């Protein structure tokens, strides 16, 4: 009995320590307290083709001057460097990256027309006159492709959004097939039934039939998925299960926020079960 009691007491102490640690992760630091030497990066998530802002405050400079800011991506090295009106961006972010508030106490990075390859962990630095970098912040960017289910009747047209001007091809996998068949690429087409809308980033598959049921994938120039669309014919749309990436984004964000709480609840359940055995 003493051994079980000691074990239960140790479990309670561990639970209390974890609870305190979790609170410290979500509670703001007290004024004047020492900063965390290794803070967790902020997490930002979005969809292909959208615009996003990677938040980053810029400290006040000792003397008035134009900040010299550098952003780096772990997998690619420096991707943007800006000082006043002078700006350099890596080729993969050409004309898509900027610091809209630089010089106003804000070094946030804005990325336009997001691509899957833009995902990763970003770090920003303030470059001094001695060419030394002062670490500012770290942001983890998650970029998700679009997913949807579309329901059509035989003879109707299927509209597929490309979502970005960087989308270059469309592939199709039939419901009863394991092979992917190219249907369209930018500047050409493999199927006369696939038409590019002249004023929109959309494709139109004309007069769908049973053989058109399956999954349609829009791909970018790197072969990465921009969107996945499942086509179903003559099904009850009201009772069908739908899924979209905005829903999945909310679920994933909730999962990230609740990861510590989940561990805490599991330990609490274990403690309650152990305590009930002691009572019995």
Image (cartoon, helix red, strand yellow):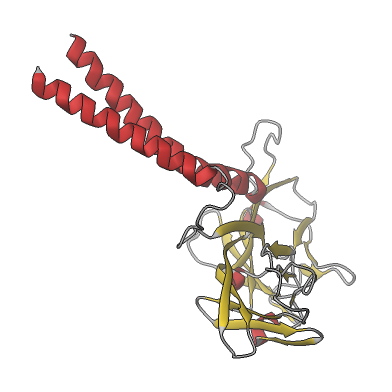
Along the horizontal axis of the image, is 15 left or right of 170? left
- The quadrant holding residue 167 is bottom right
- Return the x and y of residue 8 as percentages of the image width and height: 21, 25
Q: Is residue 223 visible?
A: no
Please determine whether, in this image, residue 197 is positioned above or below residue 267. Answer: below
- Return the x and y of residue 139 as percentages of the image width and height: 58, 64
* Between 224 and 68, the one nearer to me in the picture: 68
Residue in the image at 45% along x and 36% along y: 261
- The quadrant holding residue 126 is bottom right
* Between 219 and 152, the one nearer to me in the picture: 219
* Between 48 and 66, the one nearer to me in the picture: 66
- Return the x and y of residue 33 as percentages of the image width and height: 52, 52
Please determine whether, in this image, residue 185 is positioned above or below residue 248. Answer: below
Outermost residue to the bottom: 130
Please determine whether, in this image, residue 196 is positioned above or below residue 236. Answer: below
Residue in the image at 77% along x and 82% along y: 66
Residue in the image at 37% along x and 38% along y: 18
- Return the x and y of residue 124 as percentages of the image width and height: 60, 73
- The quadrant holding residue 239 is top right
Q: Is residue 190 visible?
A: yes
């Amino acid at each position: 009995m003493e051994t079980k009691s000691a074990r239960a007491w140790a479990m309670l102490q561990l639970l209390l320590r974890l609870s305190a640690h979790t609170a410290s992760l979500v509670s703001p630091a007290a004024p004047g307290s020492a900063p965390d030497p290794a803070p967790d990066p902020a997490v930002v998530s979005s969809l292909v083709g959208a615009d996003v802002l990677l938040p980053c405050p810029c400290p006040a400079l000792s003397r008035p001057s134009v900040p010299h800011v550098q952003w780096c991506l772990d997998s690619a090295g420096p991707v943007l460097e800006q000082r006043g009106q002078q700006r350099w961006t890596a080729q993969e972010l050409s004309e898509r990256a900027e610091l809209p508030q630089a010089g106003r106490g804000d070094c946030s990075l804005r990325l336009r027309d997001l691509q899957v390859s833009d995902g990763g962990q970003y770090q920003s630095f303030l470059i001094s006159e001695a060419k030394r970098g002062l670490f500012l912040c770290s942001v983890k960017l998650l970029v998700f492709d679009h997913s949807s289910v579309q329901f059509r009747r035989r003879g109707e047209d299927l509209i597929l959004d490309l979502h970005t001007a960087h989308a270059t091809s469309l592939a199709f996998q039939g419901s009863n097939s394991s092979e992917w068949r190219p249907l369209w690429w930018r500047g050409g087409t493999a199927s006369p039934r696939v038409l590019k809308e002249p004023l929109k980033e959309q494709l139109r598959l004309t007069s769908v039939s049973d053989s058109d049921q399956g999954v349609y994938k829009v791909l970018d120039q790197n072969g990465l998925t921009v969107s996945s669309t499942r086509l179903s014919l003559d099904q009850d749309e009201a009772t069908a299960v739908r899924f979209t990436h905005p829903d999945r984004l909310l679920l994933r964000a909730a999962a990230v926020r609740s990861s510590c709480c989940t561990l805490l609840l599991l330990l609490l359940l274990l403690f309650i079960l152990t305590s009930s055995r002691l009572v019995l």
